[in-house]
Image (cartoon, grey):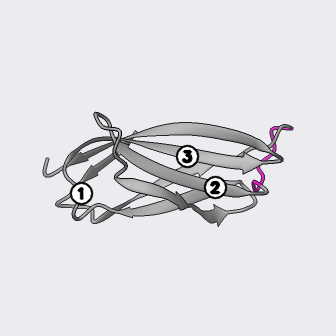
Amino acid sequence: MIFAIKTLNTSIEITACYFNDAGEAAAPDTSAKVRVYPANSDTETVAETNMTVKDSETGFYKYVWDITSVTAGYYIAFVKFVDAGKTITTQQPILIADTL
């Protein structure tokens, strides 16, 4: 889970690692994307966007999300990797609070 306090953080880093079928860290051949939804809504807060490579040797990707204008609450980040025609997805919960 990612936890952010808006009085301390202006952005958060959503991260994910990709591993190929052999279990090795790898770069997906097509894409690494993320989208974010409030936990109680079907309306995207962050439309599908590319993640950037943080470390290609470890398959580590990131997306920096500016939360200054985001309403405090619970969100879910959906990460999607596409490689060799296969789609691999994962989820990451996010809690944003106004203050402690």
Q: Earlier in the sequence, mark 1 or mark 2?
A: 2
Label 2, on which residue? 32
The front one of 78 and 100 is 78
Q: Earlier in the sequence, mark 1 or mark 3?
A: 1
Q: Tell me how far mark 1 sits from mark 3, CA to CA.
A: 19 Å
**Residue 77 percent across, percent down from the top left:** 44, 44
Q: Amino acid at mark 1?
A: Val
Residue found at the far top of this picture: 40
Where, quadrant-wise, is the N terminus in this rendering?
top left
Q: Tell me how far mark 1 sits from mark 2, CA to CA.
A: 23 Å
- The circle drawn on residue 70 is 1
Q: Are marks 1 and 3 in contact (CB under 8 Å)?
A: no
* Image-based side of 92 in relation to 45, left or right: right
Q: Which residues are magenta?
A: 22-28
The front one of 49 and 99 is 49
Helix, strand or loop status at disc 2:
strand
Q: Tell me how far mark 3 sits from mark 2, CA to CA.
A: 7 Å
Q: Where is 96 relative to 1, above or below?
A: below
**Residue 3 percent across, percent down from the top left:** 32, 45
For label 1, count other residues whose C-alpha is less than 10 Å away and answer few (under 14), some (14-19) or many (20+).
some
Label 3, on which residue? 79
